[in-house]
Amino acid sequence: QVQLVESGGDLVQPGGSLRLSCVTSGFMFDYKAIGWLRQAPGKEREGIACIGKRENSREDISYYAKSVEGRFFISRDNAQNTAYLQMTDLKAEDTAVYYCAVASGVYCGGAYDSWGQGTRVTVSS
C-alpha cells in the first residue's frame, strides 16, 4: 500500500523558512519522481516542485514553478524514502496546504499516482 506522510507545516512570519518532509512507503522510492503540490484557500491545487531523473542519466533533476523558483528547494533521501521541500523567504501568498505526490515513472512532467494528506503552511505576521 502506497503511503506518503507530510509534516513540517507551521505558522511562520513573512521572510521566514520552513522545511517540509514527506516520508513514503509501499513503492520503489528510487524509481519514482516525487513532486510537491499546494492548494491555497479558494484555489486549485498546483504543482510547485518535482524531482526526478534526467533523461538518459541516473542524475536527478529538479523543476520548479515560477512562483517559487529561487526560494524553494526540493530534495530526496533515497536511503530514508523521504523527500523534502526547503522553503525560504516565505510570502503570504505561500499560505496553503502542501502535498507530496509520487509520479507514475522516474521523470517529472507526468501524472501523479498518489498524494499524502497534506501539511498546512500559514505565512502571516
Image (cartoon, rainbow, N blue to C red):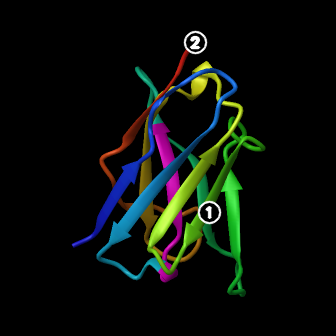
Residue 45 showing in the rendered view: no
Quadrant of the image for the N terminus? bottom left
Is 114 or 111 nearer to us in this picture? Answer: 114
**Start-end of magenta stretch:** 30-38
Amino acid at the residue labelled 1:
Ser
107 w.r.t. 109: above or below? below
**Image quarter for residue 3?**
bottom left
Amino acid at the residue labelled 2:
Ser
Task: Name the residue carrying label 1.
Answer: 75
Residue at (59, 59) in percent of width and height:
50
Q: Name the secondary structure under disc 2.
A: loop
- Horizontal relation, residue 69 to residue 31: left or right: right
Residue 42 showing in the rendered view: yes
In the image, residue 31 lies in the stretch drawn in magenta: yes
The numbered dot on residue 125 is 2
Residue at (34, 78) in percent of width and height:
27
Report, in whole angstroms, how far the alpha carbon at label 1 lies from the one at label 2. Answer: 28 Å
- Horizontal relation, residue 3 to residue 84: left or right: left
Circle 2 Cα neighbour tier, 10 Å, few/some/many (<14 / 14–19 / ≥20): few
Is 79 or 59 nearer to us in this picture? Answer: 79
54 w.r.t. 101: above or below? below
Q: Position of residue 86 (x, y in %)?
A: 62, 49
Can you name the residue that lies furthest to the top here? 125
72 w.r.t. 120: above or below? below
Quadrant of the image for the C terminus? top right
**Image quarter for residue 15?**
top right
Whichever of labels 1 and 2 marks the residue nearer the N terminus, that label is 1
